[in-house]
Image (tube, grey):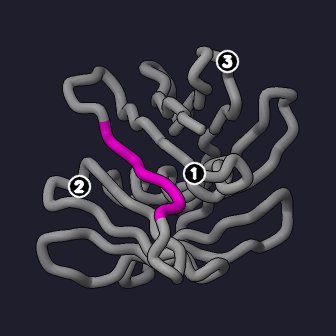
Amino acid sequence: MKLLFKQRLFSWFDSYDIYDEAGNTVYEVKGQLSWGHCLKIFDSAGTEVGTVKEQVFTLPPRFEMYLGSTYAGSISKEFSFFKPKYNIDCNGWHIEGDFFECDYSILAPDGRSVATISKQVLQWTDTYVIEVVEPQDALYTLMFVLAVDAEKCS
């Protein structure tokens, strides 16, 4: 499954549209006023399906994930040199980025690929191409991309 993640050009708060390969909106993300980033994820029918919320004053940076209103886990950045690394504590996934922080791989505990994320350069807004191996992992992968993008802006 391939998704295109695009930040809206003119918005007071973080807001994004996520499209499938056919150009249909799959998810819409709306930022909310709060301490730190708070990003609400809505499906194409307008139902809230998830939230990514930054925990302020934490080192390393940490984001909590919610499916609906249920806590699902957190994403935290590891201290590392040269290549960014993140952990997702709910499913054992590990994320590794390249030196330029444009390309990321999400790996399962057994080393198999869950998804790849590539940031598109020379765009007016933040734009990522997300390739997810299993469609059921798309929402968690989207939450990771939101957390990484928010962490870079903090």
Amino acid marked by disc 3: Asn
Question: Callout 1 environment at 10 Å: few (<14), some (14 to 19), or many (20+)?
Answer: some
Q: Which mark is residue 52?
A: none
Most frequent secondary structure within the magenta stretch = strand
The residue identified by callout 3 is 24
The amino acid marked with disc number 1 is: Val
Front residue of 110/80: it is: 110
Q: Which mark is residue 133?
A: 1
Left or right: 67 with respect to 88? right
Which of the pair 33/65 is nearer the observer? 65
The span shown in magenta is 113-119
Mark 3 closeness class: few <14, some 14–19, many ≥20 residues within 10 Å: few
Residue 143: quarter of image: bottom right
Check disc 1 and report its element: helix, strand or loop: loop
Looking at the figure, which quarter contains the C terminus? bottom left
SS at circle 2: loop
Q: Which mark is residue 101?
A: 2
Q: Is residue 117 magenta?
A: yes
Q: How far apart are labels 3 and 1 at the CA level?
A: 19 Å
Q: Earlier in the sequence, mark 3 or mark 1?
A: 3
Front residue of 39/122: it is: 122
Q: Would residue 106 be visible to someone looking at this image?
A: yes
| Magenta span includes 7 | no
> Which quadrant does the N terminus fall into?
top right
